[in-house]
Amino acid sequence: MSDNIPFEIQTEIIKRVLDVKSLLQCRSVSKPWKSVIDSPEFIADYHVDHPRPPHRMLVRYDDPIDNTKTKYVSIVDDYDSDTDDNDSFAQHKFPLTIPISVDQLIDPKIFGSSIGLFCFYSKFSRSDQNIAVIWNPSIRKSVTVEVPNVLDTPFKTVIGFGVEPFSNDPKLVKIQTVDVLDLKTISSIPKQVEVCSLSTREWRTLSDDLPRLTVAFTDDHHVVIDDFIFWLAQDREYVNGLPMKRDLVMLFDMVSEEFMEIYLPNNVTKDIYIDLSLSKIRESLVVVGCNYSVEKRVYHVWMMEDGLSDTFTKMYTISRPEEAVSTVLSFRHNGDPIIGIEDEFIGSDELFVYDPDSEQISPIGISGSMCSCYAASYMERLRLLNY
C-alpha cells in the first residue's frame, strides 16, 4: 500500500476491505501490520466495521460408511438476495482440519458457538479431566480450558459458551443441576454455577441469582444472541405430590452474570407430542417443535418477538409427507433451514436446504450417520488471534 497514505488510514482500509485470510497474509509479511492486526482493538473492530463479513456454515458429520471418521466442512454462505440460490450454496464446500486437542477428547461434540468461535466439551482421553476446547476455524487456532468440579450422579453438568460483547472476552459458564429422581432429597449444590473468562483462565463461583433447583436443563446445546446464552429447560415443581413440567428458556446474561427465565407460551408447547430445540436466524431466537405423533415428522418454526419476551410468532411448518425429515439442524444466513432426511437403507441423514416459500429442497451433498450431524452459521472473525 502506498507510503503516501497515513498508516492510520491504511489500517481502516484493510479492516473494512480484507477478509480474514488476507489479513493473516498481511501479518506474515510486515511487522507493523502484525502488531496492528494482533491488537485487541483491531480484532474487536473488525467484527463491527467490516461492511460485509463473509458468512459461512460449519457442518460436522460422521462418515456413514465408517462412522469412526468425523468430518468437518465449511460452506460459503455469502447471501445476496438478487443472485443467491440454494444450489449455488451447496457448491462451495471446503474441508476443515480440527485441532489436535479436539482429537484427544472422548467423543467430542460441539456444544455452542459465538461470533465465529466454536466450543467442544468432553473428557480428555488420557485422564479423567473434563476439557473445553474453543476453536476459531477461520484462523485455525484453538485454546484449551480445564473444567473443574464436575459432579457425578445424581447431578448433571451443563456447559455454556459465549463471547461477552463489551469486553470481547470468550466466557465459559458451568451449571450443575439435580437429576429429577433426587429433586426432593437435595437442598443445595456445591459450586452450582462457575464462570471462567478466557483472559484469566480462572473459575469463579457465583452465589447470587442462581437457577432454581426445580429447573432442569433439557438440552446441552445452547444459542448465543448478543449478551445472552439461551438453553431449553423445564420447571419440575411438584403439585399434590405429582411432578408438573413447564417448558421454559433459561438465559444467562454474560455482562451482569445473572440468570433469567422465559416460559414458553401454550401455542408453542400445547401438543404433548412436540419435542423442542433452540436455534437462531441471524440474531433472533427460534424454537423448533417436532411433532412426532404423525407417520412423517412435522416441524414448526417459531421466532421470539420484540427482543426478550414470551411472545413467539409461528413462521412456517416443514412437512414432507414423501420423506422422513429427521431433524432441523440450523438456518442459513437468509433464514432457510438446513434439514436432514433419513436414508433407511444405509442408516444415514442426507442434508438439504429447505425453501419455506416454494417448499422445495436442494441437496447439500453431505450424508452423515444418523444423529451425528451438526450445523451452525458463523462469520469469519479474528478472535483468539492474540491468545
Image (cartoon, rainbow, N blue to C red):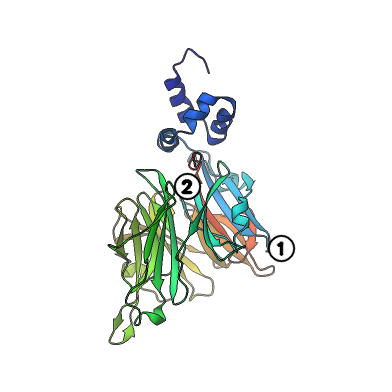
**Residue bearing mark 2:** 333
Q: Tell me if mark 1 has few (under 14), some (14-19) or many (20+) residues whose alpha carbon lies within 10 angstroms of its own.
A: few
Compared with 221, 297 (above or below) is below
Mark 2: which amino acid? His
Q: Residue furthest right?
A: 65
Compared with 256, 10 (above or below) is above
| Residue 152 in sight in this render | yes
Mark 1: which amino acid? Asp
**Residue bearing mark 1:** 66
Q: Tag 2 or tag 1, which sits nearer the N-term?
A: 1
| Residue 275 in sight in this render | no
Q: Secondary structure at mark 1?
A: loop
Question: Is 256 on the left or on the right of 126, as rendered?
Answer: left
Q: Secondary structure at mark 2?
A: loop
State if disc 2 and disc 1 touch (CB < 8 Å): no
Number of the front mark, 1 or 2: 1
